[in-house]
Amino acid sequence: MVQQPFGSIYSAFLASVERHPHKPAFELGDGATVTYADLLVDAQRIAHLLTQAGVTSGDRVACHVKKSVRAVAAYIAVLQIGGIYLPLNPAYTGTELQYFLDDAEPVAVVVDPVDAAAVRDMTPDAAIFTLDAQGMGTLAASETKRIEAAAVTDDDPAAILYTSGTTGRSKGAVLTHGNLASNCQALLEAWEYTDQDRLIHALPIFHIHGLFVAINMSLAAGATMLWMEGFDVDGIVDRFDTATVLMGVPTFYTRLLASDRLNREAVSNMRLFISGSAPLRTADFKAFEERTGHQILERYGMTETGMNTTNPYRGERRPGSVGQALPGVEVLVVDPKTAEPLPAGQIGSIEVRGPNVFDRYWRNPDKTREEQRDNGFFITGDQGYYDADGYLHISGRSKDMIISGGYNVYPKEVEQLLDEHPQVLESAVIGVPHADLGKALSPCSSQPMAQHRRIPN
Ligand code: AMP
């Protein structure tokens, strides 16, 4: 079903509330539900609180909290009042957190109660609200008062997300209301996501995947999210019966495959499994298809651009490929020096242009200029190639390129080969100094499953 154009994520959410106020926006683990109307009331209450604290259009509101439905209400509230939402990984500690707070200068900070005193010291001028994983704290304590939604344009900033950045300090990517809305709409259409969908939401909500892909799409479509605090194999399998879509990182699928509860019958209600944020192993794509009959749909995106490409919902999903550009988005593979598009099969710099591409790096015009070409294309820092059928393949990051004896070596390609070995679960290839070649390759060996604790977001 093709959705009608909508103005902003907030207005699309309001339309969902109007369409079906009593429908659950969230189903929680204990069987409780939060309806669209409940969510609106909570968001308006928080909008009122923030406004009273002095937050107005263009002000940053940082959220350094654990995953909760009320944290989503806070996100909606910030959109409503025209503020700039700044989600921060709750795992950030002292100096990291201080850096983000100093850089973004939020007018208000929503923080887990255990961190409140420290954050108050770090940002003496900001209004501090508390919110714990159960949704309790000072952010919960106020009466409802309806306030008008701020008038925002597509070009107004909606959020700042700090990039994970492997080198140097993290940069804040400023995303506009237009960025979020256009990308959401393109994905709704590409994946035929509607209010009939029931999404298993097990991703963190401080990252584009869990926030802007999963939550924006669900709120705009009027779908229901089966809410999980985090990833757990049995929790996911338990929800398959009543769900239709799962969005995950590749590790979700590796771990699901290790469960003997994963089979065709278990997923008979599911229509779509989506993977992204990191490369999905071809072996997992194939094993998943054998076990469940489903081809995992892999897509590619990043903080600065939202989603860029996707494998087709209808049509061939190609393992090892991230598919084709979303409607309205241009994705080129170019020679990094000349910016000229390269023919199929040749690895080059992946560059993106479209309404999804962020506005700028927060207070960092030099970096913004460095990564933007004159013709408006954003240099993603990823490298890849188009195959003969126009499917994009990612080879690695430009920073990851290893020049060995004058040859460019892409770690991803070597890793793929290593991963094909039956005794290798996962590998990482790095460049090490070499007297003769300048750099040589060093594989870091795989680890047994039990040691893979951290799930990337
Ligand atoms: P982040 O900004 O943290 O979301 O990281 C974005 C980066 O993740 C991209 O620039 C890619 O390097 C990588 N990435 C995202 N999706 C994929 C994918 N499907 N396959 C390979 N790499 C991916």
Image (cartoon, rainbow, N blue to C red):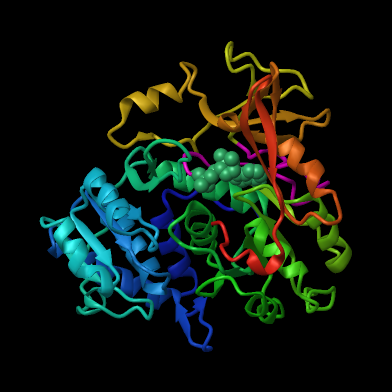
Q: Is residue 275 left or right of residue 10?
A: right
Q: Position of residue 52 (x, y in %)?
A: 13, 64
- The reply to whether residue 237 is in sight is yes
Q: Residue at x 77, y 31 (%)?
A: 390
Height in image: 415 above or below 266?
Answer: above
In the displayed orientation, state which residue is furthest to the front. Answer: 435
Quadrant including the C terminus: bottom right
Give the dominant element type of the magenta stretch: helix, strand or loop: loop
Residue at the farthest left position: 125
- Decide whether residue 311 is among the magenta residues: yes
Which residue is nearer to you in this view: 174 or 24?
Answer: 174
Identify the residue at image location x=49%, y=52%: 208
Residue 332 visible in the snapshot: no
Q: Quadrant of residue 63?
A: bottom left
Residue 41 to residue 423: above or below: below
**Residue at image x 31%, y 62%?**
77
Depth check, front residue: 159 or 250: 250
Measuring 32% from the left and 52% from the top, which residue is drawn there?
96
Q: Quadrant of residue 178?
A: top left
Image location of residue 23, percent across then percent down: 51, 78
Residue 385 x, y percent position in the rendering = 72, 28
Instruction: In this rendered view, identify the residue nearer to me: 185 or 132.
Output: 132
Whereabouts is ligand 1, in terms of quadrant?
top right
Residue 316: x and y in percent read 83, 46
**Horizontal relation, residue 138 to residue 377: left or right:** left
Image quadrant where residue 235 sits: bottom right
- Start and end of the magenta stretch? 302-327
**Which residue is most to the top?**
338
- Furthest-right residue in this view: 290
